[in-house]
């Protein structure tokens, strides 16, 4: 039943919202790859002389920031979906209780 609710919430999203989320994920992946490539470039060309040290923190920031943001957004989406499911179940039980009380009257 939870799969059905999740799929219905996914279908409520417009194609523009879905494509926007995918574009954000692709950009985050590209930024992480750029950070990794920058660190690799520094390792090959400048590590022996310990020059151009600004590349190391900049590359680490580019490499790790999108990963942290992606993780935070994923956890947030999961928490929101669970809270919506719980709220829908509570609303459903409340609706059934109110229908039952109307029948008793």
Image (spheres, rainbow, N blue to C red):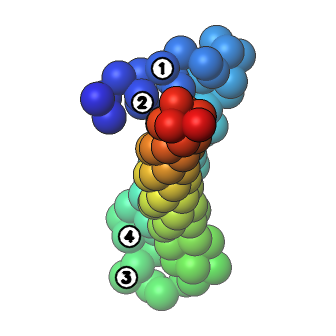
Q: Tell me: residue 55, above or below residue 95.
A: below
Compare residues 32 and 95 and report the one nearer the observer: 95
Residue 6: horizontal and vertical position, in percent? 42, 30
Secondary structure of the residue carrying tag 4 is: helix
Q: Tell me: residue 18, above or below residue 83.
A: above
**Which residue corresponds to mark 4?**
43
Which one is closest to the eye, mark 2 or mark 4? 2
**Which residue corresponds to mark 3?**
48
Q: CA distance from mark 2 to mark 4?
A: 45 Å
Which one is closest to the eye, mark 1 or mark 4? 1
Compare residues 24 and 43 and report the one nearer the observer: 24
Can the viewer see residue 42 in this picture? yes
Q: What crowding class fits label 2: few (fewer than 14 Cα within 10 Å), some (14-19), or many (20 or more)? A: some
Task: From the viewer's perspective, tell me whether residue 35 is left or right of residue 45.
Answer: right
Farthest bottom residue in view: 50
Q: Are marks 1 and 2 in contact (CB under 8 Å)?
A: yes
Compare residues 35 and 72 and report the one nearer the observer: 72
Q: Are marks 3 and 1 in contact (CB under 8 Å)?
A: no
Q: CA distance from mark 2 to mark 3?
A: 53 Å
Residue 81: horizontal and vertical position, in percent? 49, 46
Task: From the viewer's perspective, tell me whether residue 23 is left or right of residue 71.
Answer: right
Q: CA distance from mark 3 to mark 1?
A: 56 Å
Secondary structure of the residue carrying tag 3 is: loop
């Amino acid at each position: 039943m939870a799969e059905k609710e999740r799929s219905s919430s996914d279908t409520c999203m417009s194609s523009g919202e879905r494509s926007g989320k995918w574009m954000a994920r692709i950009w985050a992946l590209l930024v992480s790859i750029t950070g990794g490539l920058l660190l690799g470039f520094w390792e090959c060309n400048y590590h022996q002389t310990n020059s151009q040290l600004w590349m190391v923190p900049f590359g680490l920031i580019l490499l790790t920031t999108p990963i942290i943001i992606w993780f935070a957004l994923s956890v947030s989406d999961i928490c929101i979906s669970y809270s919506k499911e719980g709220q829908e179940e509570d609303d459903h039980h409340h609706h059934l209780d109110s229908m039952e009380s109307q029948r008793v009257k």
